[in-house]
Image: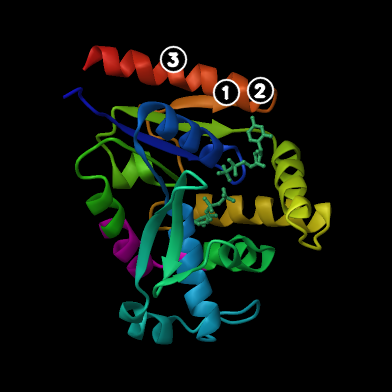
Amino acid sequence: MSKKITIAIDGFSSTGKSTIAKQLAKELGYVYVDSGAMYRAMTLFAMNENFVSENHLNKNSLLENLDKATLHFQFNEALGFAEMYLNDVNVEKEIRTLEVSNLVSKIAAISEVRKKLVAIQKEIGKNKGVVMDGRDIGTVVFKDAELKLFMTSSAETRGKRRYDELIEKGDAVTYEAVLENVVERDRIDTTRDDSPLVKADDAIEIDNSDLTKEEQFEKVLKLANEKLRDI
Ligand code: CDP
Ligand code: CDP
C-alpha cells in the first residue's frame, strides 16, 4: 500500500484554504476535513440555545451544555465531500451565514470548545491520508504533518471572493459587511490566548492574491508530490 501523508492548511479567513484542501483530497484520494465547519456548528448550537448573540456570551451555560452538542461529518457522494452534522441534523447551509461568521471567533476563542474539537480532529486524522484546513492545524492539531501550508491574500481580495460567494447563494449581504467580518475574525483569531492563528515555522506560505484556483492547485500539488516522493 502506498504511504500517506497528513496535509495541514492554515491561514486567514477566505484565503482559499477549503478550495485547495478539496482539490488535493480529491486528487490524492484523501479525506478532506473542514475544521472551521466544526467551530461554526458549535456556534450554531450556542446560538440556538441562546448562549451567544451579538451582545452577549453566556460562557458558563455553554460549558455546562457542551456535551449536548454532538458533531459528525457525513460524506456526500454527489458533492464529493463530507458535510457537517450537528446532533444528527445536516447544518451545512446554516453554518455558512454571515450571522454565524460574526459570532464564530468568539466561540472559537474558548479553550474548552477547542479541546473538544481538537480531540475529534486528531481522531479523524490518526491514520494519515487527511487534508485538514483551519487555523491551528499545523501548530496544534497535526504538529507532525508532513506538508503544512499557510495561506494569505489581501483583505480586499478575500472580502470580494467571500462576498461573491454569498451573493451567489442568495444571501442579502453588503461587501462592506463581509469585509468587516473577514478583518474582525482575523483580528480575534490572531490575538486569542489559546491556539492563535500563526504560521508554523515549517509551513510554506502561499499568497494567492494573484493566483487562480487552477494555478494555486498546480503549485500545491507539486509540493504534495515532492513530499510523497521523499517519505
Ligand atoms: O472559511 P473561513 O476561512 O471563513 O472560516 P472557517 O475556516 O470556516 O473558520 C471559521 C472560524 O472558526 C474562524 O474564523 C476561527 O475563529 C475558527 N476556527 C478556529 O479557531 N480554528 C480552526 N482550526 C478552524 C476555524
Ligand atoms: O476556506 P477559505 O475560507 O480559506 O476559502 P475558500 O472558501 O476556499 O475560498 C473563498 C472564495 O474564494 C471561494 O469562493 C473560492 O472559489 C474563491 N477563490 C478564488 O476565487 N481564487 C482563489 N485562488 C482561491 C479561492
Q: Position of residue 205 (x, y in %)?
A: 50, 26
Relative to residue 172, is residue 36 depicted above or below?
above
The numbered mark at residue 38 is none
Instruction: Name the amino acid type tagged 2.
Output: Leu
Q: Is residue 218 left or right of residue 87?
A: right
Question: Which residue lies under the disc numbered 3?
Answer: 222
Q: Nearer the viewer, residue 230 or 151?
A: 230
Relative to residue 167, is residue 138 depicted above or below?
above
Please state the extent of the stretch shown in magenta in the rendering. Answer: 107-119
Going from N to C along the chain, the mark reached first, 3 or 1, is 1
* Separation of residues labelled 2 and 1 (CA atoms): 6 Å
Q: Is residue 156 left or right of residue 16?
A: right
> Does residue 15 show up magenta in the picture?
no
* Separation of residues labelled 3 and 2 (CA atoms): 15 Å
Going from N to C along the chain, the mark reached first, 3 or 2, is 2
Question: Which residue lies under the disc numbered 1?
Answer: 216
Location of the C terminus (image quadrant): top left
Task: Tell me the residue at 57%/23% (across/down).
Answer: 216
Task: Tell me the residue at 49%/32% (across/down).
Answer: 23
Q: Position of residue 171 (x, y in %)?
A: 76, 61
Query: Residue furthest toward the left?
Result: 1
Number of residues whose C-alpha sits closer than 10 Å to that of mark 1, classed few (under 14), some (14–19) or many (20 or more): some
The answer to whether mark 3 and mark 2 are in CB contact below 8 A is no
Q: Position of residue 113 (x, y in %)?
A: 37, 68
Going from N to C along the chain, the mark reached first, 2 or 1, is 2
Within the image, what quadrant is residue 211 found in?
top right
Instruction: Name the amino acid type tagged 3.
Output: Lys
